[in-house]
Image (cartoon, coloured by chain):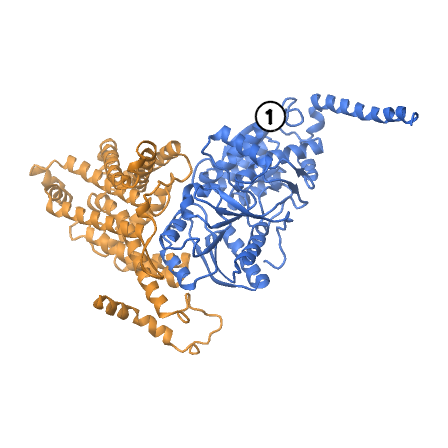
Chain colours: A orange, B blue
Amino acid sequence: MQGAAETLFFLSAPLSFCSARPSGALTLPHIQLSPPMESYSWEDLQNIFLMQGFAGISLFSVLLLMGLGLAVIFGQMGVINMAHGEFMALGAYTVYLCSTLTAEYAPSFGPYYFVVAIFIAFIVCALVGAAVEWLMIRRLYHRPLDTLLATWGLSLIMQQTFRSTFGAREVTPTLPEWLMGSYSPKEGLDIPINGMFVLGLAIAVSFALLLFMYKSSFGLRLRATVQNRKMSGAVGINTNSVDRLAFALGCGIAGIAGAAFTTIGSTGPDSGSRYIVDAFLVVVFGGAASLMGSLASAFGIAQAQSILEFFLEGTKGKVATLLVIVVALMIRPQGLFPSKVRAH
Amino acid sequence: MKQRTPSLHRRLLPVVGLLALSAITASAKPPTSEVNTTGLAVTDDTVTVGQLHSATGTMAISETGSIQAEQLAIDQINAAGGVLGRQIKVIKEDGASDWPTFAEKAKKLLVSDKVGTVFGCWTSASRKAVLPVFEKENGMLYYPTFYEGLEQSKNVIYTGQEATQQIIAGLDWIVKEKKAKTFYLIGSDYIWPRTSAKIARKHIENVIKGTVVGEEYYALGHTQFGSLINKIKLKKPDVIYAIVVGGSNVSFYKQLKAAGITSAKQTLLTISVTEDEVLGIGGENLVGFYSAMKYFQSLDNENNKTFVKAFKDKYGANSVIGDVTQAGYLGPWLWKAAVEKANSFDIDKIAAASPGLELTTAPEGYVKVHPNHHLWSKLRIGQWGTDGQAKVLYESELIEPDPFPKGYQ
């Protein structure tokens, strides 16, 4: 605990410097730093600093979950899946369906259904993903621009299907009580429980995915296929089934992401189109072919955005974040962690 | 005394005659050539009207309620004999949440279909897109949404509140009840929240003599409010004044709750949450917060009970009715009243007949059309409960619509 307190003091030191500054030093009447650091208690600032740190980490976990599935599909397989957001929405709707069914048939299961629903969302999205790969994607592997168009069409079809099935209004599943509210170790310090849950989930999924990619035989076959498709085929790897599994895996992770987002926001037929931009942003900024890149870029974007939003205001914070990314990509067009593999 | 009896008879006679006559005219309708001199789609038996909302796209969430309420009103009017003895036929067009599409469809309804009137639009952007079409082709639009004001047209009847009707009385109430001095204004980033926040700020600073400690806007669809919530915690405003719309609402209130900002510790007043939004947000995330609206589903009057029952019979027991849905329901009834007062479907005559029209059957109680084509309406403060319904705590007098408020621009 001693150590933690010291770290806290260290982290808060720059703020204390601000508050110690004589208020007469800056005498520009119309310019006000937002939020001004003067006139707040030491206690308040400590709490805000901690919570602000968590806000950044929480955004990081959201972006990471969004990006991971796409990192497999776009990063590893090179397929531009414009329907990725809709797979997230599918995951969210699956949770909503589970919630409704639980309330209807097994109300006593209410507090626990959410965990099971996440698995179901993964399976449903993975199965739909596999079907889409079989019906559509596999015919288009050598035509990337046509894939883009076809998956965009798919996204429209999925949106309209959601609209026809679940209605145009946004829906929210009933969340178990333990996911709501906040953990507050002391007065004025509240850490949202749903934020911690999403963070835990993001860590678990990333860890599982890394393990899967680098320790399992399927991961080995996938990486081999990505590096050299013809050679992999020649040594006896069924590249078709690798493709299908990888696509299904990416869609399944999108489903988990969608399920996790139901703790944060609502789900509508066009929710997917809101997610997709951020998902591509994470993957492209990170360097398309690298999982570690996605991790780093999600972290960078999240911290930049949450800090800028704190010191500027909402929309301006977002604009500033995007400007930073644009400049960074101009300097490093290949992203943060460019692929070492030679382009085929 | 004896002499007065026959005179009473004689005095009553014309009254009886008049009653009989009016009974005859009600069944015998005026000829089409008389009530339609400008070539609208009116026949001896029918009158065609248009409905122009987004049935698809991002705004479908909000506009569905208006579509349903307008249809319900039209069905009820038809069941009661129609307008000037003519059944209403509806042509539904989908604006698809796309503003140029709205303009295109408006032109189609007015020029090709020659509809008698149009019930439609929801966002200000769609209304601004169709306005020149309605003015050029001389059509009539009944617009149901509460909006930012700063507009007035001969060709539009605004059945929702303009901004001052929704904002000023609400702020006055919260100041009186909560002794509020400091306000944090939060909105989605487009014209309605920004104009509304501007009016709110003027009122807070000039009339209430309070302080605005923060004013921020977030893009439509924004879902991460962590940084904002921390700023709120730091500044500790007496009141959070929220004008967040659409899907962002859900994230905003869920995250407020998760950060420990609940009605037990914090007063929050919003002008953008109706029963429709609560359906998505979940009552448990809003408990104890206040909305300023002219209508709540829970309003306790006979008109409203009848309306709510009819709505639920038609659209299911789980359907809810928000402020705009009710305003949408007023449109067809106000149009019918205007047509019957003018005894004509001609647009110019309807426009001239509308000011002063009263509707005593309105679910919100009573409305009257102002010469500026907006409605007189009351403001109510509702406090949300876990069941997604609001308890009405306050009701103002009828407020005069003032779309161009002096001192607030």
Residue B179 percent location from the top left of the image: 53, 60
Question: Left or right of B277: which side holds A16?
Answer: left
The quadrant of the picture occupied by the C terminus of chain B is bottom right
Question: Left or right of B30: which side holds A101?
Answer: left
Disc 1 marks a residue whose amino acid type is Asn
Question: Left or right of B258: which side holds B122?
Answer: right
- With respect to residue B203, does B60 lie above or below? above
- With respect to residue A282, does B12 lie above or below? above
Residue A283 percent location from the top left of the image: 26, 50
Question: Left or right of B405: which side holds A30?
Answer: left
Tell me what residue is drawn at x 65 percent, y 37 percent: B360
Q: Residue furthest left?
A: A235
Residue B299 sits in which quadrant? Answer: top right
Which of the chains bears the disc numbered 1? B
Q: Is residue B349 visible?
A: yes
Residue in the foreground of this view, choosing between B358 and B189: B358
Residue B231 percent location from the top left of the image: 40, 61
Residue where numbered disc 1 is placed: B78
Residue B408 percent location from the top left of the image: 59, 58
Tell me what residue is drawn at x 25 percent, y 68 percent: A5
Mark 1 Cα within 10 Å, few/some/many (few <14, many 20+)?
some
Q: Residue furthest front?
A: B1
Q: Residue furthest right?
A: B3
Q: How many marks?
A: 1
Q: Is residue A150 visible?
A: no
The quadrant of the picture occupied by the N terminus of chain B is top right
Residue in the foreground of this view, choosing between B150 and A18: A18
Q: Secondary structure at mark 1?
A: helix
